[in-house]
Image (spheres, rainbow, N blue to C red):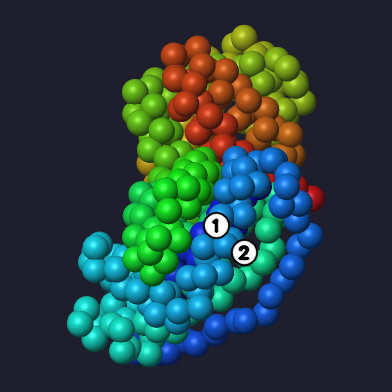
Amino acid sequence: MQLFNLALVFGVVAFVSACSQTPGTTTTTVTTTVTTVTADDDGEAGLLTANDRRIIRKTWDQAKKDGDVPPQILFRFIKAHPEYQKMFKSFADVPQAELLSNGNFLAQAYTILAGLNVVIQSLSSQELVANQINALGGAHQPRGATPIMFEQFGAVAEEVLAEELGSSFNAEARQAWKNGMRALVTGITKNLKKAEDLADPQTKLTPHQIRDVQTSWENIRGDRNSIVSAIFIKLFKETPRTQKHFVKFASVAVDALPENGEYNKQIALVADRLDTIISAMGDKLQLLGNINYMRYTHQPPRAIPRERFEDFARLLLDVLSSKGVSADDMDSWRGVLTIFVNGVSPRQ
């Protein structure tokens, strides 16, 4: 892809990563190692032209000679958007007037410089660009990074470069940097996950999935017994041996089950358990407890195979679709049910 994509991705990764530093500590990890990837400077592949890449490299090589450029970019960024200073835990509470003399602040500014230098020397590895943008989108949103933040950082960098380089930063150079920023933001916007799309590391569920499933379930939960009964009847007809797991009505004819008391007790139990699990999806501990309970109670001697849980999930999706659940909500249901099945009956 492009020089600027690589450069600013590494730069912003560096400044956003400061969010995880412990207050009161100075982490000076400025790397000056240069990694070179053979590049075709005359190639037109990617969103930037060879001329844009050449101009961005040339202007950066001029600007980096002045050691004040990195601190000025970071300082201007925070000054223009003071709300972002709280993201940098190591200097979150340092008065703005003292930032340029603060060790933690300077360490972070030169970490950005180091990242930029490495990438600018590595001109055009498309794989590196794709991996870094994907990693950036997935990993840095929890720290508060947003696409607009990258746009703002790029705009500040452009201002500082224009002041530093004077006439060398002409209209052509400014346009090259604008093109680079546009390419970067386009990539980030496609890959940066919103908070609601970030899965919890333990439950593997996203807030988006939880919201969709709970909302659509609320519309049909009053009919949950009949929904579960319809699933059981169809399941027993598809796979008759499944009924044998339920000893109290194992020998009852399938068509006669809706009139059987023991069968209806089991249906109510399953429907209420499903309702409890869905209702508790937003409470991590309760949800994990419910899933663990289901896994424990379905071990030997009952030993219901994983395939039956998969069948139940498939048939439930059929019912949901017939009830008019939206396509977006159906996607969330598929993801949630897969996680439930994996939790209750892990693959061997």
Front disc: 2 or 1: 1
Pinpoint residue 5: horizontal percent, then vertical percent: 56, 53
User: Is mark 2 in CB contact (under 8 Å) with mark 1?
Assistant: yes
Could you classify mark 1 by the number of other residues whose Cα lies within 10 Å: few (under 14), some (14-19), or many (20 or more)?
many
Of 53 and 288, nearer the camera is 53
Could you classify mark 2 by the number of other residues whose Cα lies within 10 Å: few (under 14), some (14-19), or many (20 or more)?
many
Rendered position, 44 above or below 149? above
Type of the residue with mark 2: Ile
Q: Give the left or right position of residue 220, taking residue 119 as reference.
A: left
Residue position for label 2: 120
Of 252 and 74, nearer the camera is 74
Which residue is drawn at the image coordinates 47% and 47% (left, top)? Answer: 172
Helix, strand or loop for disc 1 = helix
Residue position for label 1: 56
Type of the residue with mark 1: Ile
Q: Give the left or right position of residue 281, taking residue 247 as reference.
A: left
Helix, strand or loop for disc 2 = helix
Can you see residue 140?
yes
Q: Residue furthest front?
A: 167
Can you see residue 146?
no
Of 38 and 112, nearer the camera is 38
Which comes sooner in the sequence, label 2 or label 1? 1
Pinpoint residue 181: horizontal percent, then vertical percent: 47, 49
Rendered position, 313 above or below 147? above
Q: Which mark is residue 87?
A: none
Q: Residue furthest top?
A: 255
Pinpoint residue 130: horizontal percent, then vertical percent: 65, 49
